[in-house]
Image: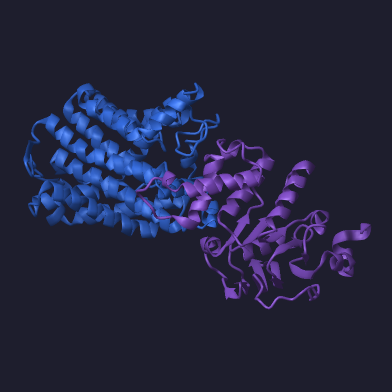
Chain colours: A purple, B blue
């Protein structure tokens, strides 16, 4: 394993740690023995060619399904195999690769109901309007992702790029300290991609971001660290410069063009 | 994912059924939505004067509450259950047994019936909620038939095959009030007092944060879970609340009919709930009462013409699913919405 870039090393435990993480689907080993520490703050990108195990890795660290082997630690605490809603309550939020919203609810309600999940769940008698702070929070978040003028539309009526932005707002509504994004620019036009990347950068100012991306160029200038997966195994990790210079990465991922 | 049937409400023409969170509704419909309890009660207040006869109005009221309770799970949470007869029947038997065997006051008997249905719902829900989609529907069907046979066998309590007879409540004595339930109009408004309370509570529930969470679960279960909702637990609570509402409907039915036929618990009664919810419009507030009225009128009208009335009701039901998937009330709302109301 290649060691991380020798930046200032904090004493606190990493915000997220994968220890020997592996996943089998039947006889197929999608991922095996991946050990990575994610330190607090900034953006870490998980990259790799198609079929490298990026999405599997993402799903394991976000609790979508349990690993076949290994552990996931959040601030030093073992969270392996906990149900998805526990992840949200600990402050880990994720956005999905495939747009995954509440299609027949309004844009505002999409975010409001997500914000509500952290505060009130089993309240049967009070009106939902009796929690104006949730609506205000939803509207502020929507303004932040650039959907301030779209709040009364149904989620399904939005354009693809807008839905991706809403996706992020829904994830942010859970007040995460760690935000996991699965290919946030998937299927976007170049212009939408640029907006999304600006947004990602802004979000990272106050949170830790881990994102999966297969367009390496996109993340090179953005992230502090990169984790490169290849054929279900950890190939390299380090700063963008380390990765660019890494001979194995150049061979399998960047090809001769790099 | 949820059962395919639960997607019927979202018709292909892009007009979603009436939903509190939906963004396209015009001013008048929004205003009506805010007063949905008052408007529903206004309709129910005049119902006995427009129904063909007054006993039928009571039937519509009771069936409407049954469909309303079912709709909490079907229309608002996105779970299709084929076992709600167990709750209607549980409520009916609980209430009937409390009156016949223990001589309880009718109001306490209503509470007893509702409690029994709630317990049955909790037991069935704990098992059924582990499954999804068509498996959920089948599990609830199987469990409700277990309950059916249980009640069928417990003859000394339930009357077995003959049903529970002799639930005679000629009058209702409340502090400072004595109502003769032999008068069909008095009986109707006495039942309406209970149903009205249930409708109000139901409306509060839908507007509550919990109701919002149920909608989120219906719309996208995995997303709701990723937001931090304990989806399984919330579904169970919705299942039990739905069972309680249907149990209350059953308890009222026992007093209304003064008998609990064993068929009350039969799976065909579960099918009735599905039919009424779809005829009226799933996921709409007022739809269950429209569906119940349609069903009761069809049954009443056709039964006098032919003993094969169920065949015709079935055919009409199929026509609805094919050509009017939003249901009567759902279609009315969709048209008003398109007209900009």
* Residue B219 rendering spot, x and y as whole percentages: 51, 45
* Residue A19 rendering spot, x and y as whole percentages: 66, 75
The quadrant holding residue B75 is top left
Residue B296 vertical position relative to residue A113 in the rendered view, above or below: above
Quarter of the image where the N terminus of chain A is located: bottom right
Q: Which residue is drawn at 23% across and 44% down?
A: B250
Quarter of the image where the C terminus of chain A is located: bottom right
Q: Residue at x 45, y 34 (%)?
A: B18
Examine the rendering and report whether any part of residue A142 can be seen. Answer: yes
A258 left or right of A63 in image = right
Closer-to-camera residue (A70/B339) = B339
B16 left or right of B238 in image = right
Closer-to-camera residue (B337/B187) = B337
Closer-to-camera residue (B124/A234) = A234
* Residue A161 rendering spot, x and y as whole percentages: 69, 42
The quadrant holding residue A223 is bottom right
Q: Which residue is drawn at 37% across and 51% down?
A: B238
Examine the rendering and report whether any part of residue B159 can be seen. Answer: no
Q: Looking at the image, which residue sits at the far right?
A: A256
A50 left or right of B7 in image = right
Residue A11 vertical position relative to residue B305 in the rendered view, above or below: below
Residue B239 vertical position relative to residue A246 in the rendered view, above or below: above
* Residue B161 rendering spot, x and y as whole percentages: 17, 48
């Amino acid at each position: 394993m290649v060691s991380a870039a020798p930046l200032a090393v904090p004493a606190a435990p990493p915000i997220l740690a994968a220890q020997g993480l592996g996943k089998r689907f039947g006889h197929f080993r999608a991922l095996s023995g991946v050990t990575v520490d994610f330190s607090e703050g900034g953006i870490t990108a998980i990259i790799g060619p198609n079929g490298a195990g990026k999405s599997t890795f993402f799903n394991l660290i976000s609790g979508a399904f349990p690993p076949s082997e290994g552990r996931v630690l959040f601030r030093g605490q073992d969270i392996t195999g906990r149900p998805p809603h526990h992840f949200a309550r600990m402050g880990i939020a994720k956005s999905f690769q495939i747009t995954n919203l509440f299609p027949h609810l309004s844009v505002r309600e999409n975010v409001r109901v997500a914000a509500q999940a952290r505060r009130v769940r089993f309240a049967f008698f009070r009106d939902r309007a009796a929690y104006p702070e949730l609506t205000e929070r939803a509207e502020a978040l929507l303004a932040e992702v650039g959907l301030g003028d779209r709040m009364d539309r149904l989620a399904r009526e939005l354009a693809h790029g807008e839905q991706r932005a809403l996706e992020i707002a829904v994830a942010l509504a859970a007040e995460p300290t760690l935000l996991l994004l699965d290919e946030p620019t998937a299927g976007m036009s170049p212009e939408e991609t640029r907006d999304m990347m600006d947004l990602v950068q802004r979000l990272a100012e106050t949170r830790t971001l881990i994102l999966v991306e297969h367009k390496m160029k996109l993340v090179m200038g953005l992230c502090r660290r990169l984790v490169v997966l290849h054929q279900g195994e950890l190939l390299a990790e380090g700063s963008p410069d380390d990765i660019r210079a890494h001979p194995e990465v150049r061979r399998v991922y960047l090809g001769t063009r790099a | 994912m949820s059962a395919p049937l639960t997607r019927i409400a979202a018709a292909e023409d892009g007009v979603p059924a009436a939903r509190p969170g939906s963004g396209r509704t015009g001013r008048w419909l929004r205003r009506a939505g805010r007063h949905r309890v008052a408007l529903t009660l206004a309709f129910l207040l005049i119902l006995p004067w427009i129904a063909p006869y007054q006993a039928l109005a009571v039937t519509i009221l009771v069936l409407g509450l049954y469909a309303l309770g079912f709709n909490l799970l079907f229309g608002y949470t996105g779970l299709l259950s084929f076992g709600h007869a167990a709750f209607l029947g549980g409520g009916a038997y609980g209430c009937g047994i409390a009156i016949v065997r223990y001589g309880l006051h009718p109001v306490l008997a209503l509470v007893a019936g509702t409690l029994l249905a709630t317990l049955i719902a909790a037991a069935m829900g704990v098992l059924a909620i582990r499954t999804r989609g068509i498996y959920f529907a089948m599990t609830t069907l199987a469990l409700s038939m277990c309950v059916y046979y249980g009640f069928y066998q417990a003859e000394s309590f339930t009357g077995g095959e003959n049903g529970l007879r002799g639930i005679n409540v000629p009058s209702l004595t409340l502090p400072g009030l004595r109502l003769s339930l032999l008068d069909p109009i008095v009986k109707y408004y006495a039942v309406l007092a209970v149903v009205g309370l249930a409708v109000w509570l139901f409306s509060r529930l839908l507007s509550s944060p919990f109701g919002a969470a149920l909608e989120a679960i219906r719309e996208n279960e995995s997303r709701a879970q990723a937001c931090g909702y304990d989806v399984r637990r919330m579904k169970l609570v919705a299942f039990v609340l739905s069972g309680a509402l249907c149990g209350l409907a059953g308890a009222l039915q026992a007093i209304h009919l003064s008998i609990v036929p064993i068929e009350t618990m039969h799976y065909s009664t579960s099918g009735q709930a599905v039919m009424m919810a779809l005829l009226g419009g799933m996921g709409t507030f007022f739809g269950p009462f429209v569906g119940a009225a349609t069903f009761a009128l069809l049954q009443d009208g056709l039964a006098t013409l032919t003993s094969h009335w169920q065949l015709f009701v079935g055919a009409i039901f199929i026509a609805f699913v094919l050509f009017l998937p939003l249901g009567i009330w759902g279609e009315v709302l969709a048209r008003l919405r398109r007209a900009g109301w």
